[in-house]
Image: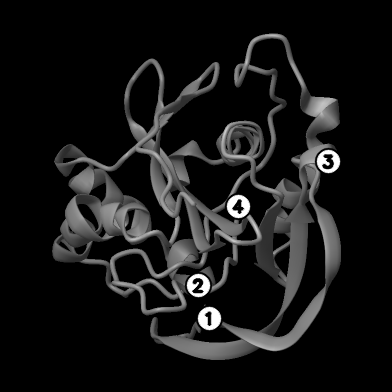
Amino acid sequence: MTTTFPDVTISTDRLVLRAFEEDDVTALAEMMNDEHVTAWTSVPHPYTHADARSWATRDSHAERTEGRGIVLAVTEFLTQRLVGIVHLQNTNWRTRSTEVGYVTAPWARGEGYASESVLAVAQWLFRDQRFERLELRTAADNTASQQVAQKIGCISEGVLRNAWIVRTQTADGSWTDTRTDLIVWSLVPEDLDGYDGTDGYRDGYSDYSEGYDGYDFGRRSDANGYAVSTDWN
């Protein structure tokens, strides 16, 4: 039984999703130091150039080669600029299920990139990899992330109470941890029937809002993978 994803590139009308490269390090560090990424995720803060280099050149690739999932850098087709990340993790090869999280660069929000990229990955996952379930988890107050989940066809399955920690900024500029609930969403192959097109992954996409995920980008995962997703726009 296959226990790793292939080294794949996925294209949409506007985006190319590929493995991270050395040239992505500077843009990745800038993206991950956004205050909203700090607030909703558990990434290191500040997110250093060394964190970005480790993730782009080593740790993101290990997610695939060690069978935990796959990390894809989301880039604009025309400019090749890094606009985000899509990360499949906590993959269960026996049940053919995995969890998705995503990040969108501050300058690229409001363009529909998160929904476009996550939907393309879901189509590839179900059609080419024969997976049966894709899961996404969002913080209870993260309404923008919940909108992305809804717009790609995810179904809300329930709430994990008191299951996640978000960070809020205090008056003096420091950050403090606050516990929150998580909403669990899922997508299965039949949920994508309405998105079927005639040209593979190049289906049409609306101008959806997007966010980023709560994975520990820049830190090596343990046996259970990275933390759960909490996306923002």
Instruction: Please tell me whether residue 85 is drawn above or below residue 75 in the rendered image.
Output: below
What secondary structure is found at the residue carrying circle 3? Answer: helix
Q: Residue 14, percent across and down?
A: 51, 20
Crowding around mark 2 (Cα neighbors within 10 Å: few <14, some 14 to 19, many 20+) is many
| First of labels 4, 2 by sequence position | 2
Tell me how far mark 3 sits from mark 4, CA to CA: 24 Å
Residue closest to the eye, 158 or 96: 96
Q: Amino acid under label 2?
A: Ala
**Residue at label 1?**
168
CA separation in Å, label 4 and label 1: 16 Å
Q: Which residue is mark 4?
A: 233
What residue sits 36% from the left and 79% below the top?
A: 222
Q: Position of residue 164 (x, y in %)?
A: 61, 83
Q: Spatial distance from mark 3 to mark 2, Cα to Cα?
A: 31 Å
What residue is pinned by disc 3? 191
As helix, strand or loop, the secondary structure at mark 1 comes to strand
Tell me whether circle 4 and circle 1 mark residues in contact (CB < 8 Å).
no
Label 4 CA crowd tier, 10 Å (few <14, some 14–19, many 20+): many
Position of 68 compared to 147: left or right? left
* Distance Cα–Cα, label 3 vs label 1: 35 Å
Image position, residue 215 (x, y; %): 46, 67
| Left or right of 199 in this view: 31 | left
Say which residue appears at 43% left-offset and 62% top-offset: 68
Residue 172 lies, in percent from the top left, at: 40, 87
Residue 39 numbered tag: 2
Q: Amino acid at mark 1?
A: Thr
Determine whether label 2 and label 1 are within 8 Å by CB. yes
